[in-house]
Image: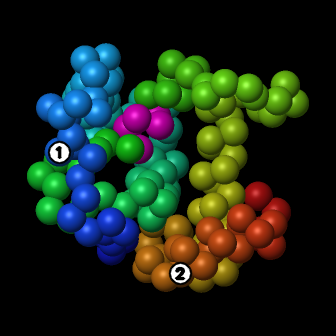
Amino acid sequence: MAERRDPYPGYDVLAKRDGPSWNEQTRRMVDARLAIERDDHRVLDEAEWRVLGALCDRIVPQPADREQPTPLAAMVDRKIRLGKTDGFRPANLPPLAEAWRRGLVAIDAEARAAHGVGFADLGPDRQGALLRLIQAGEARHEA
């Protein structure tokens, strides 16, 4: 499991729940998202799910002291299952589920080619370096 960092020590957006910056619609939406079971995945297989979990931990680390971390990977899996997109999507892209699968498989393949183990088994520094390499368009594996 990736080491969890807290980029904003002491700040917890959930602490604002009952304050003036959240309205009732925001509370309902956040509550619904947090009610998703952390291990609820119906679209991604176990290997894809493991990579997604490590990717979520790396990109959006959760506060270490949070009793119930936000179920980010489960939220992504649900979004894929429901076909929910964030707006504009180029027509030449594969369907959402296929795009996620290809991406997760490629990240894992790049990790295995570079380090001999899957992405989820790399330490935080190697995960970060690998993601920066991919972001820069310098991935070497054909996947």
Coloring basis for residues: rainbow
User: For residue 23, what is the image quadrant?
Assistant: top left
Mark 2: give few (<14), some (14-19) or many (20+) Cα within 10 Å. some
Describe the element under mark 2 as helix, strand or loop: helix
**As drawn, which residue projects farthest toward the right?**
92
Q: Position of residue 28 (x, y in %)?
A: 26, 19
Q: Is residue 17 visible?
A: yes
Q: Main secondary structure of the magenta part?
A: helix
Residue type for callout 1: Ala
Magenta stretch: give its range.
73-77
Q: Position of residue 143 (x, y in %)?
A: 76, 58
Residue drawn 80% across the image and 72% down it:
138
In the image, is residue 89 above or below residue 49?
A: above
**Label 1, on which residue?**
15
On whether residue 86 falls in the magenta region, the answer is: no
Using the image as rendered, state which of residue 11 and residue 63 is in the foreground: 11
Residue 7 — which label?
none
Quadrant of the rendered image containing residue 136? bottom right
Which amino acid does the dot numbered 2 rest on? Arg
- The dot on residue 126 is 2
Q: Nearer the viewer, residue 71 or 101?
A: 71
Q: Which image quadrant: the N terminus?
A: bottom left
Among the 4 quarters of the image, the one containing residue 72: top left
Based on the picture, tell me whether residue 75 belongs to the magenta stretch: yes
Q: Position of residue 9 (x, y in %)?
A: 26, 69
